[in-house]
Image: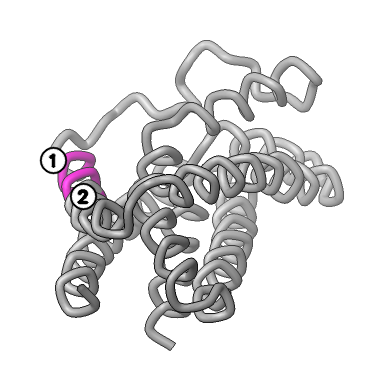
Amino acid sequence: MQLFLLGLGMGVVGGLLPTPLHLIATTQMTLRRRARAAWVLVGPPTAIDAVFLLITYFFYKMIPPFIAHDMAYVGGAALAGFGAYLLWANPRKGPEKKEYAWNLTSGSLALATLVEASAPGTWVYWLTVAGPIIAEGRLEGYGRIVPFFVASLLGYYAASFLSVWLMAWGAGAHQRFRKGMFLAANLLLIVLGALFIARAYFVG
């Protein structure tokens, strides 16, 4: 249950934080192209996760268990620090204000996917959060960690669809919705970071 709740929280954070893929999907929702919006929210993120899952699995298969455990502390600190930094910096220029065309074209979709795959948060999540959990599964059985990843997917897709629907529905109040989701996601990120550090301490 603990891993399920942690995974759910991580998924919700990922789904609430606006990304270029969310913005393409929002445009499609505004144009009432719901099937295309759903594909943008599901297809590229699933492909990114599959690639990172394989990379992380083989990486943590090679390193000693004690290093994997120490990485859990790094991951928790990185999550909390990242959330605190974003709240403190309060960036005014989100991805929707960069000079990209966020219509659904092969070029914009490829660019949005590349931006999401190369984002620091993606690497931090897989190498310092999901990685130690995969290493834990290697020692105690992979069935034990399945709830974390299932809950992460459920939380991500549910939060993504909800945030895109809210932004499309409240197009005139887009900034207000975006700021609210940004605040909620980063506060949750700080809480999750602290929980991951505590879990690393007690599990270790």
Numbered mark located on residue 104 in the image? none
Residue 136 lies, with reference to residue 128, above or below; the image says below
Residue annotated with mark 1: 88
Q: Secondary structure at mark 1?
A: helix
The percent coordinates of residue 140 (x first, y second) are 45, 78
Q: Is residue 162 among the parts visible in the rendering?
A: yes
Give the image quarter of residue 70.
bottom left
Query: Which quadrant is home to the N terminus?
Result: bottom left
Residue annotated with mark 2: 74
Q: Secondary structure at mark 2?
A: helix
Q: Nearer the viewer, residue 171 or 152?
A: 152
Please name the residue shown 27% across and 65% down the image: 192
The percent coordinates of residue 118 (x first, y second) are 49, 27
Range of magenta residues:
79-86
Number of marks present in the image shown: 2
Marks 2 and 1 sit apart, C-alpha to C-alpha, by 20 Å
Please name the residue shown 58% across and 15% down the image: 100
Please name the residue shown 67% across and 34% down the image: 24
